[in-house]
Image: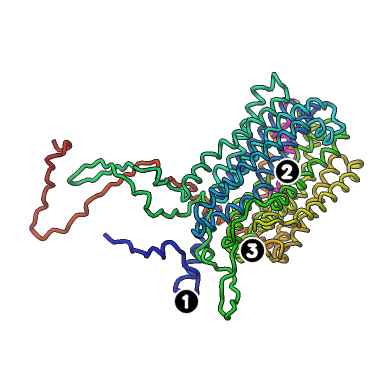
Amino acid sequence: MTTPPVHAPDEAAVPAARSADVPGADAGADAGERSSRGLLARAALLTAVLSVAGSVLGLARDQALARLFGAGRETDAFLVAWTVPEFAATLLIEDGLAFALVPMFSLALARRAQGTVPGDPVRALVAATLPRLTLAFAAAGALVVAAAPVLVRALAPGLPDHALAVDCTRLTATCVVSFGLAGYCSAALRAHRRFLAPAAIYCAYNTGIITAMFVLGGRWGVRAAAVGVAVGGLLMVAAQLPSLAGQLRHPDGRPDRRRLRFRFGFRLRFGSRFRFGFRRDEGAGAAPRTSTATATDAPTPSAGATAGTHAPHRGTAGQEAPAPRAADTPARPLALALLGTVLLFALCRQSQVLIERFLASGLPSGAISHLNYAQKVAQIPMTLSLMLCTVTFPVVARAVADGDTERARARVERDVALAAGLVLLGTATVVACAPQMVQLLFQRGAFTAADTAATAGVMRVYALGLLGQTVVGALARCYFSAGRANWYPLGAMAVGIAATAGAGAWAVGPWGVSGIAAANAAGITVTAALLVAGTGPRSVPVRVRRVLGDLARPVPVAVAAAVAGALVADHLAAPGVSPAVPLAAGAAAVVGVFAVLAPVLGVRGAVPAVESVRRSLRPVTRRLPHGRINLRIRFPLPRRLPPGARPRRPRKSRGSRMSR
């Protein structure tokens, strides 16, 4: 039996910095980088799978809404009230609050790892921020309830059923509190590299809405969907509370030994004894065990990054000294400037929906519904492509906190390139197969063939802005990754909103809802261009020319794939054929053409993406040691006997009941 090497306490606690003087340091760093990519890929795959499940349930929710209530005045009234959860999700879950809280929790985790701050910085951060934010969420929800009539009149002045929209708005206002708490839990868990519960919240949310519509729809009409929004918000919080409470109780991901005094052990030893053991655990003063990286935990910074592998600067004596890290600075409370910038940015981004519905309220009945259904389906590729950025955002924030700018820049550039390739693949599929998608998903009950044609046309125009939406979502994270207020993204978004409003007001007359969708695509593209041009001192300093090249290469590939997929889907579409057949054939053609042309034109990440998916198929979860039975089976090794010797029979134990 070999004895494992014993390391000194300092070596086990403090990772060594990368240095050319240390043999094998570069090889170990490369192995750590490969392991980091594999773990990130598995975490992204887990998040994407649950996000797809949530999107499927969202489509089922939209199908139930279209089947039960059609695309008429009642649905338009609910969709005006639906603005409240849409804004709340963007401000409090997806973009706004996460941009402020994830860097703050990453900084607290860096201080906890260094041990330079007395107490637990993470618990102190929760105690300082959660009560105040909860009161702010409750006040905002009460304000929405009180101002519901004014809000509905401002959003849709030409709406036929104003009273129904006010009732639905007041019912959905409860999501301001529930979404705020759910967003807080999501940000904290993602900073802790826990992605399972945050990715599952939309599954719980859509399940609550669907259940409420089918149970209460016959009695309350479309108000049942608003009740479902309130129920689904509570389910989002309930899905994350156990995981967050466990992280706060057990900072290292293992049971707190000061509270869990005893542990049961179950051992089987074949040979001379059978023993059922019960042992007491180590005391409160035992040294905590370090937790290893798991699949659901995106990797912590490598040893070099933790030890300060950022670019050194010259000290006063001519010696190289490490650059100051954000984790070494004194703790900062939740700054109102930071919270204000991220919330205003998210609010300005989401105001595109307000402009669309304001312009569509003067069009014939059903225009708002067509815009809503088209937007929901067209934005699925963008949502899936941004899953990678959602997973890596805590990694970028932690790298910035550690002062490792190079690692943060490489991560952002890689994420933008991969997200652009994925969203353009989805864009090509949406453009090629839009009529078949809408027919398969919505054309039943009160949703007619005319609604299908109108929705498919709008969806194809919406798809033109998906690349801009993805670039905005990916680069906005690097602007706020340092945890400081940054007004440039808000200014870029305001310019894009002004472009959307101006183009929409000009195009709604001649082109109707298609003109509104085109204005949306043009405005978000302007914002994306401004964010790319503004990277540098204001954010993670990415290389602009390289990013532009990574964004431009997949565009001709997506155009060719969309043309091929449209030809195949239109050729197979027929009155007696199910829409699933041309949809599957067209999507297969798009994927095939994209897979062939992407490596030829040098699309970054085309080949590594396939390899990452292959590696991601490994197990993505692990069982924690607490709450399970330790089963140890020991077999005695056979001894080599001298020639002519006979083996001895095991002696029976007199005190063992098993031997009697």
Mark 3 residue type: Arg
Q: Check residue 21 in the rendering and tell me which mark sits there, or answer none.
A: 1
Is residue 358 part of the magenta span, yes or no?
Answer: no
Q: Disc 2 and disc 3: Cα gap in Å?
A: 30 Å
Which residue corresponds to mark 3? 409
Mark 2 residue type: Ala
What residue span does the magenta drawing correspond to? 426-445
The crowd level at tag 3 (other Cα within 10 Å; few <14, some 14-19, many 20+) is: many
Mark 1 residue type: Asp
Q: Quadrant of residue 659?
A: top left
Q: Quadrant of residue 586?
A: top right
Q: Position of residue 27 (x, y in %)?
A: 48, 69
Q: Give the prevailing secondary structure in the magenta stretch.
A: helix
Q: Position of residue 288 (x, y in %)?
A: 41, 53
Query: Which one is earlier in the sequence, the residue at label 3 or at label 1?
Result: 1
Which residue corresponds to mark 2? 378
